[in-house]
Image (spheres, helix red, strand yellow):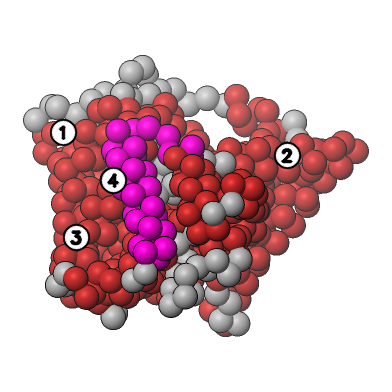
Amino acid sequence: MGAELFWLHGVYVLFVLIIIAAMVMRRDTSLLCMIGIAVLGLTATGSVTTAVGGLFGSFIYAITELLPTILVISIIVAMSQVLSETGINETMIKPVSSLIRTPALAFWVIGLVMMTISWFFWPSPAVALVGAVLLPAAIRVGLPAIGVAVAMNLFGHGIALSGDFIIQGAPTLTAKAAGLPVADVISASVPLVIVMGVVTTVAAFWYLRKDMKNGLAVEPLKEFEDSDSDEKSASTLLASGLRGWLAAAVILLFLLDVCAMFMLQLKGGDATALVGGTALFILVAVTLIAHKQSGLEKVTSHLIHGFQFGFKVFGPVIPIAAFFYMGDSGFVQVFGETLPAGSQGIVNDLGVALAHTIPLSKEVAALALTAIGVITGLDGSGFSGITLAGSLAQLFATALGTGAATLTALGQISAIWVGGGTIIPWALIPAAAICRVDPFELARRNLYPVVIGLLVTTLVAMFLI
């Protein structure tokens, strides 16, 4: 490895370590990533102007890569807003409340409903919907509010978000960073998501039942009472019968999307486009029906809300993704053919070097990806670290000669379970607020089940690599 190549790769590794250290200390990493991009450009080209211009170019490259994901999430959030304000969301979920007759049924029904809705709408909008409708029913049958919060967290921000099979935002990010097709990462993640989900939720329910028997379960901070304020507000926009028809139509349209994905073998961007287009159609149709003369203006208002949410969530991700894209083909796209002769890309070069210097086994690789996912999730954003997980999964897979998709999926799952809203207290605030429980108590209750789940899932991944 030539001196120029050595320095370039050394800079990349140095900044990766600095970024991980900053995440462990719960500090923001956006500035570090921007400095890292500029230093990489300066090292490769020796030109200050090229390095500064490349910093801006890396943002353009990252946004171009992430734009389909940002767009579909923004549209789905916009659609969720109009469904909530018209009462259609509540109408869709009310029949499920009749199934809640015991604390055990309440836990599993709320969890499964949260998971299903989160697959299509993402957990953030689903938390308010599920909590508002099913929380009072769960309290009435004896499930503590903390149990409802645990169920919503683990099934929504855990199982649904870590797999993200429908919207495919998470696997798209990790797949791009690892240089793999999205379908490969999704396929590899299915058994891992199932193992992680089953182990974690069963362990959490066991701990909850044990504490309920011992009288240690935390009660809600104040009494829950059924309120018809939302119903009255929604009735001014849509009649009850019309809400029912529209709720059925929304469910039918998304079920047709799922059928089309299987029948037409739509994957990756095509599947995301289908879901996004359907959500956009629902947004426009429901808004026009509900608001009539002011419908045109309301459509724009909902879209603005959705885009504000999308860029607020992905704003911190863009500079981080831009840095880690520099480890692959993004470097040539931004800085041109400036890599030294013989280089196959920074991450690939490191993988080859790693393979010739240390005996890297699949067990070590699996443990490393889980640890990386956990560390990068400590900032409370599950998404900010999955590009790093994807890049390092590619590095380890290159060294091993196999297991790229499984390692990528493992890093994605561990990062999102820790940082996406099940362990870090400041990421738990929405669910804790809806259920009116202490977010630190919720994090404490999630800790042991998630740790047990990660250990078992890592063990399973070792056999799948």
- Which residue is more in the foreground, 15 or 183? 15
Q: Nearer the viewer, mark 3 or mark 1?
A: 3
Q: Name the mark on residue 375.
A: 4
Mark 3 and mark 1 in contact? Answer it, CB < 8 Å.
no
Find residue 212 and name its label: 1
Residue 275 appears at what percent x and percent y?
62, 63
Query: What's the distance in space between the residues labelled 3 and 4, CA to CA?
Result: 12 Å
Number of disc labels: 4
For badge 4, the amino acid type reads Ile
Q: Is residue 6 one of those drawn in magenta? A: yes
Whole-angstrom CA distance, mark 4 to mark 1, is 32 Å
Per the rendering, the mark at residue 367 is 3
Residue placed at 49% from the left, 42% from the top?
A: 35
Indicate which disc, 3 or 2, sits on the residue closer to the N terminus. 2
**Residue at the spot x=53%, y=62% of the render?**
331
**Of pointers 3 and 1, the one earlier in the residue sequence:** 1
Helix, strand or loop at label 4? It is helix
Distance of mark 3 from mark 1, alpha carbons? 34 Å
Residue type for callout 2: Ile
Residue depicted at 21% across the width and 33% down the height: 444
- Which span is picked out in magenta? 3-31
Q: Is residue 33 magenta?
A: no
Does 269 sit above or below residue 335? below
- Residue 304: assigned label: 2
Residue 452 at what x, y percent from top left? 16, 51
Which is more foreground, mark 2 or mark 4?
4
